């Protein structure tokens, strides 16, 4: 592949790390971002921003730039982009690698309610809201007459499904403010990880959080909230990852991805 570039679909810390490694090794790479975040952390090297226009648009882009391989290092919940990458790679016979951080696994002390998708998470929170107000909170504490207090860390695109929950109070942590309808009782806290344990403990304690809602993103940068929840006995509604496309090879680290690319070069 010598001078032919790798297309690196990013928006994650792993993608930035791989872009830096490839750049340092002199392997041509173009990073691609969706353009969702106003002020994104940019990887080193060439970057393009914005959608390709579906599978056909991506096929055209790969052809035009004579791309040697596609590395899908998008977030584990960016399902559409991953499917498009697999579809385009299949059409052109382009090698495809998925770089995915491993999912978080519950430990003995974790109290996770695992749900299949964000809609199911909203239903789980609605059930807990009713039980909490009635004083039969699943955690066993006396909650009669108190509103359920929810820490929502699922990202701004997924807040809308909680909008019709008028009885719980939501602390919504996001990078950029959501533009969708919001639940009537809420507070927005804008921040970007990484987060540490002492900060997460303080956030949960000071806001008297009863339940944490998160997607199973995996990785170390946002893991502290799970440790804090376990320490404080706060239950977690954990949204499981969507299925991955069947095509391509999968690795967990930027180092393994770099090795896979080096083999293509050999
Ligand atoms: P998505 O639903 O899978 O993708 C929707 C559309 O956005 C895609 O069809 C594509 O448009 C465009 N797109 C997505 N990722 C792209 C990329 N890296 N480069 C160029 N176009 C991209 O994606 P999403 O869940 O909205 O995530 C968008 C970006 O944010 C991804 O890059 C992802 O890595 C990052 N991110 C997502 C989450 C999350 O929870 N979903 C969390 C952190 C970071 P076209 O069809 O026009 O090509």
Image (cartoon, helix red, strand yellow):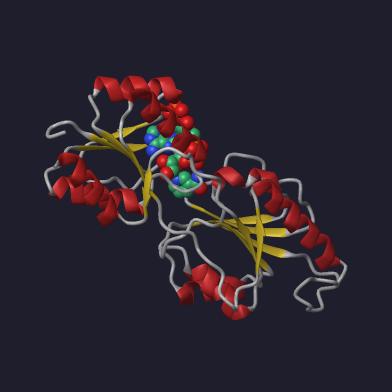
25 horizontally vs 72: left or right? left
Which of the 4 quarters of the picture holds residue 32? top left
145 horizontally vs 72: left or right? right
Which of the 4 quarters of the picture holds residue 237? bottom right
Q: Point out residue 223 in the picture as x, y percentages from the top left corner.
A: 47, 66
Residue 37 visible to the viewer: no
* Nearest the eye: 178 or 116: 116
Quarter holding the N terminus is top left
Residue 207 visible to the viewer: yes
Quarter holding the C terminus is top left
In the image, is residue 107 above or below residue 116?
below
Q: Point out residue 224 in the picture as x, y percentages from the top left corner.
A: 48, 70
233 horizontally vs 71: left or right? right
91 horizontally vs 189: left or right? left
Q: How many marks?
A: 0
Looking at the image, which residue is at 60% across and 45% down? 158
Q: Quadrant of ligand 1?
A: top left
Identify the residue at the far right of this view.
134
Looking at the image, which residue is at 30% across and 32% down? 48
Looking at the image, which residue is at 65% across and 73% down? 234
Q: Point out residue 121 in the picture as x, y percentages from the top left corner.
A: 68, 53
Looking at the image, which residue is at 75% across and 65% down? 148
Q: Point out residue 161 in the picture as x, y percentages from the top left corner.
A: 68, 45
């Amino acid at each position: 592949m010598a001078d032919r570039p790798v297309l690196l679909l990013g928006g994650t810390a792993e993608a930035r790390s791989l872009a830096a490694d490839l750049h340092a090794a002199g392997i041509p790479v173009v990073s691609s971002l969706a353009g969702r975040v106003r002020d994104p952390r940019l990887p080193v090297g060439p970057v393009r921003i914005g959608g390709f226009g579906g599978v056909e648009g991506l096929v055209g882009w790969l052809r035009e730039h004579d791309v040697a391989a596609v590395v899908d290092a998008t977030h584990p919940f960016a399902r559409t982009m991953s499917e498009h990458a697999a579809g385009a790679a299949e059409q052109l016979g382009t090698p495809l690698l998925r770089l995915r951080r491993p999912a978080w696994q519950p430990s003995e002390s974790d109290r996770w309610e695992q749900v299949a998708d964000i809609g199911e998470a909203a239903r789980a929170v609605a059930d807990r809201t009713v039980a909490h107000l009635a004083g039969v909170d699943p955690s066993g504490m006396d909650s009669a007459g108190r509103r359920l207090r929810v820490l929502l860390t699922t990202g701004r695109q997924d807040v809308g499904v909680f909008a019709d929950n008028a009885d719980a109070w939501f602390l919504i942590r996001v990078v950029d403010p959501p533009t969708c309808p919001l639940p009537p009782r809420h507070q927005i806290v804008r921040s970007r990880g990484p987060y540490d344990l002492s900060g997460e403990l303080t956030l949960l304690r000071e806001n008297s959080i009863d339940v944490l809602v998160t997607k199973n993103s995996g990785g170390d940068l946002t893991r502290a909230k799970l440790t804090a929840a376990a320490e404080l006995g706060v239950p977690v509604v954990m949204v499981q990852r969507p299925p991955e496309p069947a095509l391509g090879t999968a690795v967990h680290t930027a180092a393994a991805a770099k090795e896979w690319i080096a083999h293509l070069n050999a």
